[in-house]
Amino acid sequence: MDEELKLRLFAGDISQLGPAERFLKSMVAIPFAFKRMEALLLMCSLQEEVSSIKESFATLEVASKELRNSRLFLKLLEAVLKTGNRMNDGTFRGGAQAFKLDTLLKLSDVKGADGKTTLLNFVVQEIIRSEGLRAARKLRENQSTTSVQTEDLVEDPAQESADYHRNLGLQMVSGLSNELENVRKASLIDGENLSAAVMKLSHSLVKTKEFLDTDMRSLEDESKFRDTLTNFIQHAEQEMTCILEEEKKIMSLVKSTGDYFHGNSGKDEGLRLFSVVSDFLIMLDKACTVVRNSTKLPVKTPKKGTLTSASQESCPESLPDIRKQQFPAIQERQMHYSSSDDESSSP
């Protein structure tokens, strides 16, 4: 303010001032120059700010719907819940009806008997197997309705191998990240920054309207600028009303989505739900890569004279047998779960 006052009171030769001072001297001669600049800045940036906020809201809305409607994601949660209940059978943790999604990020911490195979690997292999059987069944059902002979398109059920089912299931499970693409996009949105952007925009609009209704009203010869600003304020207030209503709706949807998975805990964790699921999808992709690479292991060539024993050594153990060895605590019950899942064809 001291610098502004000095410039206002300066009555000497303006050429004696530097370029910056001459510019500011001209600026302070305009009534409410800096408030005008703030208003003009809002007029220039409003549409871009609104578009960015609306885009974030749209991503959160689609991500919430993707999570709720993903059959495969719900199937994974069901498998984790059932597996956890079987491992905790007989304890106070057994018989759980739900779990916090944060638990998904801890599945890699639970190791099997070999110290390498994780509970996540176990669950993923089970889902790959059941999804492979389901996909093969769907293929047979779809192709049986066409006029083309089925044997030309798909293997006979009796000839379908475990590798065939595994490849089908692997395609399904590894495609979950693409299915939940908007969830991963939503995980990049900072909830606090988004709310702050809405609040800042609203505050700037209120401040500009006050400037219009007070300072600008006292200037009789500024009708053109005042009319332009009046029209802008009317449009901006409509936009801001829509933004505030949309924010309330989207944040309510996000909370209800969290409650859908966690139960009505009463705690609002904001957008953390999407970050947790996104991190889990990264873990899931890695687990699928492990399964994919495990099917590409080369088979050792048996030595002469030891054909029978060498052949037996070179034949890898079946995945179900390996899983039973790694997590024997859920061996018996797991077979019941797997068969019941295979028989279900409902999405």
Image (cartoon, rainbow, N blue to C red):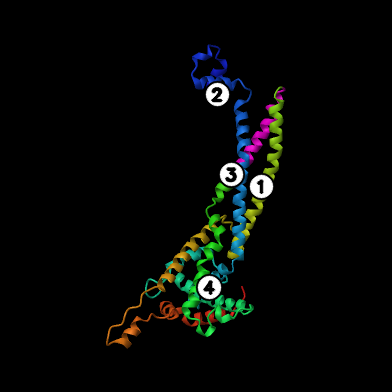
274 part of magenta stretch: no
Return the x and y of residue 48 as percentages of the image width and height.
60, 42
Q: Secondary structure at mark 1?
A: helix
Circle nearer the N terminus (2, 1):
2
Mark 1 belongs to which amino acid? Leu
Which quarter of the figure has residue 181?
bottom right
Circle nearer the N terminus (4, 2):
2
Q: Main secondary structure of the magenta part?
A: helix
Q: Are marks 4 and 1 in contact (CB under 8 Å)?
A: no
Tag nearer the camera, 2 or 3: 3
- Residue ID at (59%, 28%): 34
Circle nearer the N terminus (4, 1):
4
Mark 3 belongs to which amino acid? Ala
Q: Dot 4 corresponds to which residue?
A: 79
Circle nearer the N terminus (2, 3):
2
For the residues marked 2 and 3, what is the alpha-carbon distance in whole angstroms?
29 Å
Return the x and y of residue 252 as percentages of the image width and height.
64, 56
Question: Which mark is on residue 244?
Answer: 1
